[in-house]
Amino acid sequence: MSGVLRAFTIGLTAFLTVVDLFATQAILPALARAYAVSPAEMGFAVNATTIGMAAGGLAVALLGRWLDRRRGILASLALLAVPTALLATMPDLPLFTLLRIAQGVCMSTAFALTLAYLGEHTSAADTAGAFAAYITGNVASNLVGRLLAAGLVDHWGLAANFHVFAALNLAGAALVWFSVERTPPMRPADMSHGHPLDSFLVHLASPALRAAFAIGFLILFAFIGTFTYVNFVLVRPPFSVGMMMLGVVYLVFLPSIVTTPLAGKVAARIGTRPALWSAFALAAAGLPLLLAGTLPAVLTGLALIAVGTFFAQATATGFVGRAATVDRGAASGLYLASYFLGGLAGSAVLGILFDRLGWSACVAGIGLSLALGALLSTRLVVSRPKAPVRDERQPAPLPAALSECRRVSPRRP
């Protein structure tokens, strides 16, 4: 498989894995009308996938070393089509919420196992490109999924939307069947770093990793709060955006497709903390524009928030991989769990602010989360063992081998 085709296949797999995750946000107003509930209630139900995403990430962190990667990805994507298709029956809101949680478990399992597969079965030279392709596919799903959902609902209704997305889930399973190689189980040597629960304790004892997990929580808190409730603002006066146009609004994700894969290089050049500060500052710069009365200003603000939060997410993920001294899979599982729980908290807390105090209060809550993320970034320091300090008055020690030679070599007469 050529490099371009391989990158395209990896990106398409990522796209088909998480295309359901945020696509439903674009049809939130239509769902709220169909269920006759408030924006906060519908926002929580739709974003309940994050509960499943967190649970699936932790499950893979705990059990992933015993799971066959290919079979796990295949089963997850095939099973994902079941709750997606059942959503087309328009069940009551509690069952709708449970089906969204089930979607999240399947998506997260496939996502985590694919990342594990790429890490284990790509060469050191190809790993960066593979992960960049996967992240790019993930970002593209945010854009195309929303566009597709808005268009489907506008022309054929809510049920047709969920049927099409169920077909996409099965297409993802078919792609994995033909593109992911069969691999042998992990060797016992690969399981030498103890039980994942022990690794969890090690990671949670690290101040830098705890800060990174909290930053992940705050990133999705801000992202979900922005892109869930802005939909309700845009369909009301003075904007009065129609359903199809609401999907087009998400072209604001296009710049993120270009900037997100650059996060690793930028962090390597200027450092993790400056990269995160820049990302949070960029996102914060978009917040005042969300309160403007013109659509171009709001779209510019959304684009800045998207670029900033996606860039921050990629940077924080890379830091966790570098900072974890043991069992990086467990560290990634903890990070993903915290990240997705942040999304759930954002939909709940900011939804209450939106319902009771309005859009301005919601935007203020988003700004607070970005400020806290920037503050926590100061703690992202990886401690390294210090070199022993030598007393300059003492002669430098000889290398061990040379010292041994002097000891055993006979003196010259």
Image (tube, helix red, strand yellow):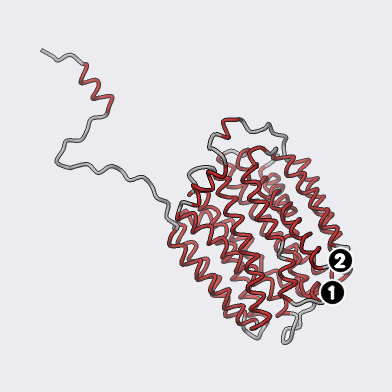
Q: Give how far across and how far down residue 94 sits, in percent.
A: 79, 65
Q: Residues within 10 Å of mark 2 (few under 14, many from 20)?
A: some
Q: Residues within 10 Å of mark 1 (few under 14, many from 20)?
A: few
| Label 1: which secondary element | helix
Residue occupying the point 49% across, 54% down: 209
- Residue 131 lies left or right of residue 395; in this view the side is right
- The residue indicated by pointer 2 is 90
Q: Give how far across and how far down residue 20 sits, in percent.
A: 75, 59
- The residue indicated by pointer 1 is 34
Question: Nearest the camera: 34 or 243?
Answer: 34
Q: Report which quarter residue 164 is drawn in.
A: bottom right
Discs 2, 1 touching: Cβ within 8 Å:
yes
| Label 2: which secondary element | loop
Question: Nearest the camera: 169 or 6?
Answer: 169
Residue occupying the point 81% across, 63% down: 95
On the rendered image, what quadrant is the N terminus found in?
top right
